Structure formats: C-alpha cells, structure tokens
C-alpha cells in the first residue's frame, strides 16, 4: 500500500503538468517566432547586400565612365591642340604664299615696266626723221602715260623762249611760245628737274598748272622740255613706271630728235667708214 502510495506520489499534479506543457508550447512558439524573425532579418540583410552590390556596381561603372570621359576629354584637347597647330601652319603657309605672290607680282610688274621702257627707247631711236620721232613721242605719251594734252618744246636760238615743235589736245595759241623765266614749265627747264603735280588730279591740269614737265637734256645741258598739261580722265595720278618713263624721255628724246635731224640733213645717207675712222677730228 505504501509502495502504491509512493508511486502515486511520483506523478506530477495535473495543474503542474498543464503548466509545464504550456511552458513548453510557449517556448517552442517563441523559438519559432525568433526563428522566423531571424529568417526575415536574414532575408532583409540579403536584400540589402544585393542592393549594396548593385549600387557598388553602379559606382564602379560610373567611375569607369568618368575615367573614359577623362580620357575622351584628354583626347579632345590633344586633337584641339593639333588643330591649332595645323591652323597656325596653314596661316604661315598662306602668309608665305601671299609674300611670294606679292614678290612675283612685283617682279612681273617690273618686267612689264622694263619691256615698256625698252619699247619706248626702241621706238625713239628707230625713227629716221624728226617727224617720226615726234610721232613716236606722241604715241608714247598717249599710250604709256595717258597724256591727253601735251607739247614738246625746244629752246629758241636766243635761249629766251621755249618754242612748241609738236602738241596734242591743247590750243596752239596758248602753248606756242613760253618764256624760260616764267611759270612751272620755265622753272623746270631752268633747273633741269622733272616736275610732277602733287596732291591733285593730274587729269585736271592746265597750261598754267601742268600735270608734269620733263626737261630734255643733251650733252650736259637742257635744250627743251615736254609739258603734259593734263591726262585722260581715267588717269588721275602718276605711278612709278611713269616716273621712270619721264626720266628715259628726258635723257633720250633730245638725242633722238637731234640724230634724226642730222640724218635728214645728211640726205639720209649713212656715213662712210672713213667718218668713223677719223673720230678724233
């Protein structure tokens, strides 16, 4: 009986059993809840890690893009510098080409001027009569200088007046005879210096205010003059080649006229060889 009572006393009371079962169930529920919370937190952390990895990938791509942009900008700057260098070289080449073209044009102009002077000299000295020399002078003045009104003067035997031996475009009465001591023409003749009108339209010259005066020299003295009273309307100023032609006419026109006169006086005969052998006489 006692044993039966003792074994009966080993069983927990029903209330205690229920409390134990409730505790165990609650413990497992808590464990399950904690496990679920851990799983959810783990999932959240995984999502966060994936998000961070994605953001990290974006940052890496952005950095790579920035590096590419920097390389591109550096390449663009190199190309811009190369372009500037090429433009500078091109400008230098254009400047050199312009200088060459200018020198070429100047040389071409000088050659043309020399050709004109040669033609003028050839025409003067190829004439065998005074009339032909004067006609050549008129053509030279009209074609090369653009003279519209002019006269060719020789000094009188007394040396007091300049007498017109040829003229063009001017009233004969106004230019026929000019005292060597009066006006621009007389002053240029007396000084033996070429006169050029300055600061005005040379096409609007006159007898009293000529556009140019060219003294004619022979054997170291002045024996006449060419007076250009005015040029053609399109010729408003003299240029360098005109000045060179004036110098040539001043030196060559008088000898051409005198030689033509002497040749005509000699009956247009060429002297014999003896005339050249007796040069000292």
Image (cartoon, rainbow, N blue to C red):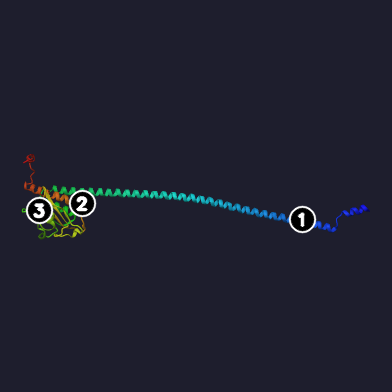
Q: Which residue is mark 3?
A: 154
Residue 88 location, x and y as percent? 37, 49
Look at 47% across and 51% down and name the residue there: 73
Per the image, label 3 sits on a secondary structure element best described as: strand
- The first of marks 3 and 2 along the sequence is 3
Q: Residue at x 70, y 56 (%)?
A: 37
Residue at x-position 56% and y-position 52%: 59
Residue 241: give its label.
Answer: 2
Compared with 89, 229 (above or below) is below
> In the structure shown, which secondary structural element does the residue marked by tag 2 occupy?
helix
Q: Residues within 10 Å of mark 1 (few under 14, many from 20)?
A: few
Q: Which sits earlier in the primary sequence, circle 1 or circle 2?
A: 1
Q: Is residue 181 left or right of residue 235?
A: left
Indicate which label's residue lies in the foreground, 3 or 1: 1
Q: Position of residue 97 (x, y in %)?
A: 32, 48
Mark 1: secondary structure: helix
- Report the number of discs: 3
Which residue is denoted by mark 1 in the rendering? 27
Residue 77, percent across and down?
A: 44, 50
Q: CA distance from mark 1 to mark 2?
A: 126 Å
Label 2 CA crowd tier, 10 Å (few <14, some 14–19, many 20+): some
Q: Nearer the viewer, mark 1 or mark 2?
A: 1
In which quadrant of the rendered image does the C terminus lie? Answer: top left
On the rendered structure, is 75 left or right of 274? right
For label 3, count other residues whose C-alpha is less than 10 Å away and answer few (under 14), some (14-19) or many (20+): many
Tell me, for residue 81, which label it has, or none: none
Foreground: 27 or 271? 27
- Mark 3 to mark 1 CA distance (whole Å): 150 Å
Closer to the chain start, of discs 3 and 1, is: 1
Q: How far is mark 3 from mark 2, CA to CA? A: 25 Å
Percent position (x, y) of residue 78? Answer: 44, 49
């Amino acid at each position: 009986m006692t044993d039966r009572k003792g074994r009966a006393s080993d069983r927990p009371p029903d209330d205690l059993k229920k409390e134990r079962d409730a505790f165990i169930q609650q413990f497992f529920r808590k464990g399950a809840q904690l496990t679920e919370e851990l799983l959810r937190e783990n999932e959240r952390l995984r999502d966060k890690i994936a998000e961070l990895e994605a953001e990290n990938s974006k940052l890496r791509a952005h950095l790579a893009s920035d590096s590419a942009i920097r390389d591109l900008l550096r390449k663009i700057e190199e190309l811009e510098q190369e372009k500037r260098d090429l433009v500078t070289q091109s400008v230098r080449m254009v400047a050199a080409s312009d200088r060459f073209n200018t020198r070429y044009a100047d040389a071409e102009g000088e050659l043309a001027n020399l050709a004109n002077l040669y033609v003028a000299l050839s025409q003067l000295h190829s004439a065998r009569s005074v009339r032909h020399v004067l006609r050549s002078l008129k053509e030279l003045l009209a074609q090369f200088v653009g003279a519209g009104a002019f006269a060719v003067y020789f000094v009188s035997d007394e040396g007091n007046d300049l007498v017109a031996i040829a003229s063009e475009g001017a009233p004969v009465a106004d230019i026929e005879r000019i005292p060597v001591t009066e006006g621009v023409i007389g002053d240029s003749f007396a000084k033996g210096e070429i006169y050029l009108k300055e600061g005005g339209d040379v096409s609007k010259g006159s007898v009293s205010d000529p556009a140019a005066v060219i003294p004619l020299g022979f054997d170291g003295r002045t024996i006449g003059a060419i007076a250009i009273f005015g040029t053609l309307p399109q010729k408003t100023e003299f240029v360098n080649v005109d000045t060179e032609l004036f110098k040539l006419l001043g030196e060559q026109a008088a000898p051409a006229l005198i030689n033509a006169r002497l040749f005509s006086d000699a009956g247009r005969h060429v002297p014999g060889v003896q005339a050249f052998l007796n040069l000292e006489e």
